[in-house]
Amino acid sequence: MNILGWLLFGLIVGAIAKFLMPGRDPGGWIVTILLGIAGSFVGGFLASALLGRQEQTAGWIGSIIGAIILLFIYRLIVGRRTVV
């Protein structure tokens, strides 16, 4: 059940990040889940670095901010590709 919870949380966080950052996105729902889960880790890291706490979780807001950061980086990297 724990893995299903992570996948559901990642899907929700990734979808919210894509909603808050409109534009054309390469990738489907699997990329959305991965961005959401990774965004949670990034948000937790940023929260511990900025606030000085050693917490492992970022919460909803921190996870969404982390997912938005990763989505921005993902768009920069994948958006530059050209199809030959």
Image (cartoon, rainbow, N blue to C red):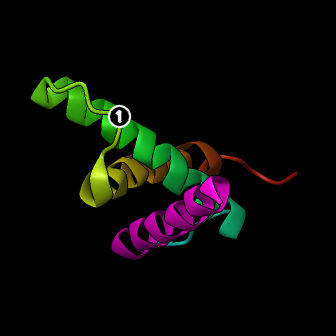
Foreground residue, 79 or 55? 55
Foreground residue, 34 or 23? 34
Give above or below for 70 relative to 27: above
Q: Main secondary structure of the magenta part?
A: helix
Q: Is residue 4 magenta?
A: yes
Q: Residue at the location (30% across, 45% down)? A: 58
> Looking at this rendering, what residue extends furthest in the right direction?
84
Q: Residue at the location (65% across, 60% down)? A: 1
Q: Is residue 28 shown to the viewer in this render?
A: no
Residue 78 appears left or right of 58: right
Q: Is residue 30 magenta?
A: no
Instruction: Please state the extent of the stretch shown in magenta in the rendering.
Output: 1-22
x and y percent of residue 25 in the render? 58, 66
Q: Quadrant of residue 8?
A: bottom right
> Which residue position is annotated with label 1?
56
x and y percent of residue 19 in the render? 41, 76
> Looking at this rendering, what residue extends furthest in the front direction?
1
Q: Is residue 71 shown to the viewer in this render?
A: yes
**In the rendered structure, which amino acid carries the disc numbered 1?**
Gln
